Amino acid sequence: MFLRTRVPAALLTAVLVSTGVAVASPAAAEATVTIPSFYTPPATLPAADGTLIRTEPLPLALSLPGITGRLPGTATRIMYKSTDSAGQPVAVTGAYVEPAVPWSGPGARPLVVLAPGTMGQGDQCSTSLALQRGLIVGTEEDQLTVSIGYEVLAMYRMLLKGIAVVQTDYVGLGSTDRLHTYVNRVDEGHAVLDAARAARALPNTSITTNSLIGLYGYSQGGGAVASAAELQSSYAPDVRVTATYAGAPPANLADVTAAIDGSELTGALGWSVNGFMQSDPSLQPVVDKYLTDSGRTALRRLSTMCAGDALLAFAGKSSTEWTTNGKSVIDIVKAEPRLKSFIGDQLIGTRKPAGVVRVATGVSDNLVPHGQARTMAADWCDLGGKVVYAPVMLLPTISPLLNHAGPLLADQGAAIEWLGDRLAGNSAHSNCLILPLLP
């Protein structure tokens, strides 16, 4: 049973005001709350990808009265049909928010699909629940769980520009029928594209067939929208993507896995391994032969953890503590052809992306390494993609997590302005020609 409380007003108000977002105090705290029944998928799913399965009003934890409605808008919780990497139907949850303020640009109100950064693997970590509850604090299987809806910063900034936003929870995060397939390239890309379809199918919104579509994501979200931009032409040609902001994308999981091992985010290794076995159960015996009892316990615990929990429980630990031969996860992946092939299939940067893509990456980021994100941008340029490569220059710290999170905040305003300009019909010039000269 999870014990969840809404975030204290003073805490989130201070954070959001610092970014220019207007907020009001959240409602009173909630005592014991379980995962709502909304998140349990039906036994039979629709045939068409993006079809709405169910919807319900979603009360926002942070909102205030406006002249034409509550700011920043009116939210709807959604469940929609998608297709996973095995070609099987899957239910995905998320949220659509209709802005209370008008769109000031030309044409119809645009739509942005927001792909969240790393939230965790427990269903209580989903971003759509975080929009409702703000801060989640409690226990699961006698362990602490902590999750904060930090994506509200970017979402509210877009809503206050009059941009409609639909957010995906990804496959298995929130929906209770399976484990979240963390950083699965195809699952994430499909979930992003089908979220756009689901938003367009909602009744009584200002979205039209002429609404331009943008994608926004940082970290896990950056990888998700990068994958979606690559898969759009083959999977969802009806979802015409105008522009994508892909911040700090984990494009090469081999490089990212090596970097996060022993960092504050070591727990993400467990989410990756759990997700791989969810996507391809035949990998289970390959993984099992390397796991110690403590390794199995770590993976089981992580399967119900949020990002805050994992930071508290696994920061600074090494995956060598989980294995029978004392080797790291990445060393085992390199030694096992099945695992090496699976992680190789997750590579992003091998297909020309749709629309124009702004790839932002912190030069000092050594958690989701700068080099592999830059390589993705360069590979897209070589494929004829329209790429705006934006290296973010910040001084390095001793903390990989801060080196990774810093560019998110430092570049967020510029990223949303850039995306808004594209959705207003203004063109962007690729800088592929000078990318070799940039850090």
Image (tube, rainbow, N blue to C red):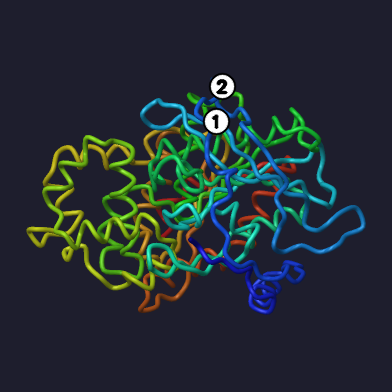
Q: Quadrant of residue 135?
A: bottom right
Q: Against 27, is 427 above or below?
A: above
Q: Are marks 1 and 2 in contact (CB under 8 Å)?
A: yes
The residue lying at 81 percent from left, 35 percent from top is: 204
117 vs 400: above or below: above
What residue do we see at 43% from left, 39% from top? Answer: 380
Q: Residue 81 appears at what percent x and percent y?
A: 54, 30
Disc 2, SS: loop
Percent position (x, y) of residue 221? 49, 50
What's the residue at 51%, 31% (across, down)?
82
**Coordinates of residue 98 in the picture (x, y in percent):** 76, 46
Q: Is residue 389 visible?
A: no
Name the residue located 70 percent from the left edge and 32 percent from the top edge: 200
The local crowd at label 1, few if under 14, some if 14 to 19, many if 20 or more residues have their Cα within 10 Å, is: many
> Label 2: which residue?
48
Residue positioned most to the top: 47
> Upstream in the sequence, badge 1 or badge 2?
2
**Displayed quadrant of residue 72:** bottom right
Q: Examine the rendering and report whether any part of residue 423 can be seen.
A: yes
The residue nearer to you, when weighing 438 against 134, is: 134
Residue 146: image location, x then y, percent: 48, 68
Q: CA distance from mark 1 to mark 2?
A: 7 Å
Mark 1 secondary-structure assignment: strand
Amino acid carrying mark 1 in the image: Lys
Q: Dot 1 corresponds to which residue? A: 81
Work out whether residue 437 or residue 155 is closer to the camera in this orientation and state it.
155
